[in-house]
Each structure stands twice: as C-alpha cells, then as structure tokens.
Image (tube, helix red, strand yellow):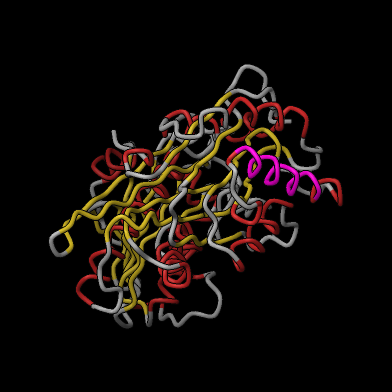
C-alpha cells in the first residue's frame, strides 16, 4: 500500500508522546521544497486554536510543515490554547531550522482540555531529531482518535510524458457531517502547483468528497484538509486536458479517503452510498443527498436491513429549498426499484434485504426534473456509536 512518503520529497513520522498513554499521538509532515500549500477548514464557529493559526499562516506564506497531535483538540481553551498552538509551531520550526511562518499545526481529540504542551515539546525533540524520516504508516496511526483503522489513499497518472502522483492520509470516525467534520486530511503531490491554484482545486475536490460524507450529522471544531505540492514535475495548469487529468487524481484520492472515513464511522457496520439523479440542478442533488445520508431513521433502518423506502422518501421530501414533484420521484435499493414515479412497487423483499446486509449499500434516487446529480457517503447508526461516545471522555 502506497502512502504519502512514497512521494519524493515528503517526510513524515509519528510517535507516542504521552498525550494518549500507550498510543502514537504526535506526528509531522515535512515538505522542505514545497512550492505550494493550501487548506480547507471547518465551518464550526467554535474553531480550535490550530484552525485559526493554520489558516492565518496559509494566507500569507508557503507552508512546508505541519505538526499534528491526537488525543487533545485544543479547542475552547482560550488564550492559553492559542499560545500553545503557536508555541508548538515555533518549537518545530526551530528543530527543522525553517521560519516559524512555514510551520502550521493540527489537533484532534477531546474539546475543552488544555494541550499538555510540555509533552508536545518533549515529543517534538524526539520526533524531529531525524526529520528526513519517511514513515507514512506511523503518521497515519498517530493522527487517529476513535478510528479503528488508519486511512491511506494513492493515485497516479501519466500527464504528458511524466507520472504525476497524489497521496493522502486522513483520520475521522465520529462527528462527521457535510462541511467536513472531526476529520483531518493531508494530501501531497509531486506536481508543481502554486498556492492559489492549489487552494482552488483543493476546495473543489473537498466539495466532491469530504463535504459529501456523514456519520452523525455533527461538524467539529477542528476539521482541516491540507495539501502540499513538492514541485517535482510541472504541467500547464491552464491547459484544460492536463488540469482535468490532475484534478481527477486529486478528487480520486479525496473521495477514497472520504469513503474510508464513512466506512469507519463509530460503531458502523456498512458503508452507504446515496446517488441522486435527475434533480433540477447539482445543488439540489447535493442537498437531497445530504438529507438522506444524515437521516437517523434511514441509517437505523439500513443497520437492520429493513427495506423501508418510506424513510428514504421522507428524507428526500424534507429537504428545504429544492425543486421537487413527489409524483416524479423514484427510489432503488441496489438494482431493485421499490418506488417509481411516486407510486410504491411490488419488489422481492428477500433480495433487497440481502443487498442491505452487504458491507456497501447503494440507494439511488431519481428526482425526475433535470440533469442534477451527486453522490454522498455515510454509514449505518448502531448501538456501538452510543457506546463509543459515552465512553470517549
């Protein structure tokens, strides 16, 4: 399995610094020759200190390193939390021998607890003693919280005469909703792309991936997706053929990571893919998909393999500010039509139940009005979700 450190010029590692006793909890990603860096950040108004600090740095500088800790969100921690975020970046910059403005921070974990900055600084002394380490697997493990598995994605394609690569790691399992969630994502590419263009393309890729997933409908204080370009190979970013090919790579990696997060939802037993077709426009299709993937009634029905299409049409119908004619709406579970043009169908219940028991469940919905289309991903809602979240703190 290829990961971020399989791209030339990307260094990363993760260690146990004591923030989460007995587990890896501190990591870095370092791209010393980065020619571009960009980020997409949470919409939550209780933004963690790391989010504000990182966004500020990325507006003004080409960032080359990120320090990531798990086990502590450093959110709702006041002025001390702000100072600790900055202190983390400054300590890492000193060890890497680069300007402090080129280092940002990301955190994930419990909200409202001060970051144990002494543990972080001691961990950085160990972590960055050999900054040219290339261990993407350790990095992916160190950023996990309630995740059951680390999450990696990799894609490559020939553009012109050169092989372009995009790779990423992510964490996320709960507090996952469209507009991102308690998730962190880190993307690297060997392409030459400056920060403004990378920011635009990353936002587009996030809209087609991380903003299309939901576990529980909650958006966190700490989400961010960062991207770094090493500058190894160049292509014309204004050439439509080349930039379309590259953007497809970026979307592929982001979607693979997003689906891995949804599949690993807290207590989840299956991935749910919702495809909305023939909506009046793309925005309507996206809104309808979000409504379905966020519905607790849909999620619990699918956990029990209950082919209750009524819960799906109810979730479709409650979507606000979209064009809809109920007499034109149709629903499929997998390949099985259960509701057609506003009328219930007779269907093979046993066959549908078999599909709903699979590890990946497909719901397809036609609105019957236009060409708008979208895909969303989520998971079932189980008792395991309650158990994990009541035991988290």
Q: Is residue 230 magenta?
A: no
Left or right: 21 as drawn, with respect to 29: right
Magenta span dominant secondary structure: helix
Q: Nearer the viewer, residue 273 or 253?
A: 253
- Whether residue 311 is visible, yes or no, is no
Left or right: 393 as drawn, with respect to 59: right
Residue furthest out toward the top: 22
Q: Is residue 38 above or below residue 366?
A: above
User: For the point 58% across and 35% down, which residue is it?
Assistant: 385
Q: Is residue 248 above or below residue 122?
A: below
User: For the point 51% across and 34% down, which residue is it?
Assistant: 131
Residue 296 at x, y percent in the picture: 55, 50
How many numbered marks are there? Answer: 0
Q: Is residue 256 above or below residue 341?
A: above
The span shown in magenta is: 83-95
- Whether residue 370 is visible, yes or no, is yes
Q: Nearer the viewer, residue 165 or 231?
A: 231
User: For the point 81% across and 48% down, which residue is it?
Assistant: 83
Q: Is residue 86 magenta?
A: yes
Q: Nearer the viewer, residue 170 or 132?
A: 132
Q: Quadrant of the C terminus?
A: top right
Q: Quadrant of the N terminus?
A: top left
Residue 153 at x, y percent in the picture: 34, 43
Residue furthest out toward the left: 161
Q: Nearer the viewer, residue 203 or 301?
A: 203
Residue 156 at x, y percent in the picture: 23, 51
Residue furthest out toward the right: 79
Residue 159 at x, y percent in the picture: 18, 62
User: For the point 22% across and 70% down, which residue is it?
Assistant: 242
């Amino acid at each position: 399995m290829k990961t971020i450190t399989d791209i030339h010029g990307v260094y990363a590692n993760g260690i146990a610094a004591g923030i989460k006793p007995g587990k890896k909890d501190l990591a870095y990603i370092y791209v010393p020759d980065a020619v571009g860096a960009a980020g997409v950040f949470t919409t939550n108004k209780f933004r963690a200190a790391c989010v504000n600090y990182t966004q500020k740095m990325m507006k003004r500088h080409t960032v080359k390193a990120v320090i990531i800790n798990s086990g502590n969100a450093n959110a709702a921690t006041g002025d001390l939390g702000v100072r600790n975020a900055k202190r983390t970046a400054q300590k890492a910059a000193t060890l890497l021998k680069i300007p402090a403005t080129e280092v940002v921070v990301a955190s994930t974990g419990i909200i409202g607890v001060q970051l144990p900055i002494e543990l972080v600084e001691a961990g950085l002394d160990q972590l960055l003693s050999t900054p040219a380490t290339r261990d993407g697997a350790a990095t992916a493990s160190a950023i996990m919280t309630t995740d059951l598995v680390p999450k990696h994605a990799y894609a490559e394609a020939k553009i012109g005469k050169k092989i372009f690569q995009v790779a990423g790691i992510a964490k996320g399992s709960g507090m996952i909703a469209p507009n991102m969630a308690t998730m962190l994502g880190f993307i690297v590419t060997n392409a030459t792309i400056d920060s403004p263009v990378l920011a635009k393309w990353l936002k587009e890729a996030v809209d087609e991936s991380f903003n299309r997933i939901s576990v529980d409908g909650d958006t966190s204080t700490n989400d961010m997706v960062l991207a770094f370009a090493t500058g190894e190979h160049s292509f014309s970013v204004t050439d439509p053929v080349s930039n379309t090919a590259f953007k497809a790579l970026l979307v592929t990696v982001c979607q693979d990571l997003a689906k891995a997060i949804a599949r690993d939802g807290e207590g989840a037993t299956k991935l749910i893919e919702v495809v909305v077709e023939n909506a009046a426009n793309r925005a309507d299709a996206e809104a309808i998909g979000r409504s379905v993937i966020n519905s607790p009634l849909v999620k619990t029905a699918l956990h029990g393999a209950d082919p209750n299409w009524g819960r799906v049409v109810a979730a479709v119908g409650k979507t606000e500010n979209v064009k809809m004619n109920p007499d034109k709406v149709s629903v499929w579970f997998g390949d099985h039509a259960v509701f057609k043009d506003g009328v219930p169908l007779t269907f093979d219940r046993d066959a549908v139940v078999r599909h709903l028991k699979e590890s990946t469940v497909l719901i397809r919905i036609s609105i019957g009005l236009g060409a708008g289309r979208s895909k969303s991903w989520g998971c079932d809602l189980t008792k395991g979700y309650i158990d994990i979240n009541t035991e988290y703190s």
